[in-house]
């Protein structure tokens, strides 16, 4: 649940794309097996070890299976070499092709789908059937499950969170509309404004990750609930910073609360709910997984791992013309709300960007949405052009805005 979100996707607003070299491995190769080297302190620090972990999450963390179902939706392969030859400019004005960008070591896999057909596909460092962690792209999946329950009349976004989760009565969350969590406007502390959120045990985001098993639980600053893996106990320690609905602030605890609400309303685990509502309906080729802590609380904001093709199949739900055989599980009305952005009749800024809703990281007046995740995960959708781009990476570069895939250029140039 690292800082990749808004800053990284602002780079989509310009037509000059910056790329950097991948970070070098933090340590020399070891004869010891990767699993034997992994600790809760080092699994996400970059290099070869993180690369292994990112495709073996279920071997490192307790995980629930998100099961596929039904017939596989075929994605015919009709590769267009001209896409890989697309020329881009880096910050110094030097040109490189998309192929060069993808092969520079920072990208694990890259996929472009147009009108239900794969037109570009590269896997420089992984295999097509690897389940790669998608980090905060998980949020888009969890919010899609919420949207489906909303469409079914089972969830009212105007209700306060304690209506769904009585465990949060009397806490700072009490009285907060579910809608304010959906739009990242809860006003609760723990906003991820810098990487301090993931390094400082005093920060509520660090404490949340420790509760869910992604950070060490040794620091004296951690609340007792975090040490016990008690999610609701930890959530009750989070305080209000400002009135709900007042200001957008990227805060992953919002998603974690939403994940618990989705599970509570469905009467099933979050993994089973996502399977029932989404993964079994999109024509996925493989099961996905969702990490959880020792008490079964899921990492709702970042813990899903899936193949790149199945991530693209999820993205196709939001296009105007999803492929044959894929169920339309989200209503057109809800999809239109997502693409319209937060609020009513909002005016786009000078870059065509709209206020954000349903926890997407970019919404434009050109029919585009995108969701990013730490270390180089991305899902981009251009609804009107039926374009989906998905990519995965292992790139802990300090400034994530230097690592965007030029999705908008691809859509504009070729489709």
Image (cartoon, rainbow, N blue to C red):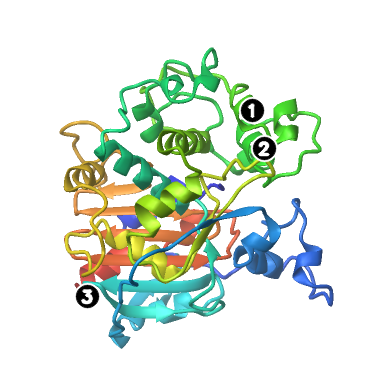
Q: Which residue is mark 1?
A: 234
Residue 361 lies left or right of residue 385; in this view the side is right
Say whether disc 3 or disc 1 marks the residue closer to the N-terminus.
1
Q: Are marks 2 and 1 in contact (CB under 8 Å)?
A: yes
Q: Within the image, what quadrant is residue 93 found in?
A: bottom left
Residue at the extreme right = 31
Q: Residue at x 76, y 69 (%)?
A: 34
Residue 382 lies left or right of residue 235; in this view the side is left
What separation in Å lies between label 2 and label 1 (alpha carbons)? Answer: 7 Å
Residue 414, disc: 3
Q: Are marks 3 and 1 in contact (CB under 8 Å)?
A: no
Indicate whether 115 appears above or below 159.
Answer: below
Q: Nearer the viewer, residue 198 or 338?
A: 338
Query: Callout 3: helix, strand or loop?
Result: helix
Query: Callout 2: helix, strand or loop?
Result: helix
Residue 77 lies left or right of residue 378; in this view the side is left
Q: Which residue is mark 2?
A: 211
Say whether disc 2 or disc 1 marks the residue closer to the N-terminus.
2
How far from the left and from the top, in percent, is residue 13? Answer: 31, 54
Indicate whether 24 appears above or below 120.
Answer: above
Badge 3 local density, few (<14 within 10 Å), some, or many (20+)?
A: few
Q: Nearer the viewer, residue 321 or 149?
A: 149
Say whether disc 2 or disc 3 marks the residue closer to the N-terminus.
2
- Frontmost of labels 2 and 3 is 2
Residue at the extreme top = 170
């Amino acid at each position: 649940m690292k800082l990749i979100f808004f800053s990284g996707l602002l780079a989509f607003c310009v037509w000059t794309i910056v790329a950097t070299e991948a970070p070098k491995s933090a340590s020399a190769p070891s004869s010891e097996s990767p699993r034997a080297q992994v600790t809760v302190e080092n699994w996400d620090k970059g290099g070869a070890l993180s690369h292994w972990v990112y495709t073996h999450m279920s071997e490192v963390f307790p995980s629930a299976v998100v099961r596929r179902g039904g017939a596989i939706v075929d994605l015919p392969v009709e590769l267009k070499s001209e896409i890989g030859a697309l020329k881009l400019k880096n910050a110094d004005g030097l040109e490189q092709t998309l192929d060069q960008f993808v092969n520079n070591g920072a990208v694990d896999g890259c996929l472009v789908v147009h009108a239900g057909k794969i037109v570009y596909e590269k896997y420089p460092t992984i295999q097509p059937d690897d389940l790669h962690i998608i980090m905060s792209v998980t949020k888009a999946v969890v919010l899609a499950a919420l949207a489906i329950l909303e469409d079914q009349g089972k969830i009212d976004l105007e209700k306060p969170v304690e209506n769904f989760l009585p465990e949060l009565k009397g806490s700072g969350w009490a009285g907060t509309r579910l809608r304010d969590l959906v739009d990242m406007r809860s006003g609760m502390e723990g906003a991820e404004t810098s990487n301090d959120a993931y390094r400082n045990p005093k920060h509520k985001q660090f404490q949340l990750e420790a509760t869910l098993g992604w950070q060490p639980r040794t620091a004296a600053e951690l609340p007792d609930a975090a040490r016990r893996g008690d999610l609701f106990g930890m959530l009750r320690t989070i305080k209000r910073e400002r009135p709900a609905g007042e200001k957008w602030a990227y805060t992953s605890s919002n998603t974690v609360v939403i994940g618990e609400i989705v599970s509570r309303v469905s009467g099933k685990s979050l993994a089973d709910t996502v399977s029932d509502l989404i993964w079994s309906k999109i024509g996925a080729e493989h099961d996905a997984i969702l990490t959880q802590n020792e008490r079964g609380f899921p990492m709702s904001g970042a813990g899903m791992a899936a193949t790149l093709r199945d991530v693209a199949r999820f993205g196709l739900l939001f296009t105007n013309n999803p492929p044959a055989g894929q169920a339309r599980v989200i209503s057109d009305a809800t999809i239109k709300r997502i693409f319209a952005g937060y609020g009513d009749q909002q005016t786009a800024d000078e870059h065509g960007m709209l206020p954000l809703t349903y926890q997407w990281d970019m919404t434009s007046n050109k029919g585009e949405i995108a969701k990013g995740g730490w270390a180089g995960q991305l899902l981009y959708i251009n609804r009107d052009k039926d374009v989906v781009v998905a990519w995965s990476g292992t790139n802990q570069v300090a400034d994530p805005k230097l690592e965007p895939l030029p999705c908008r250029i691809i859509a504009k140039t070729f489709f």
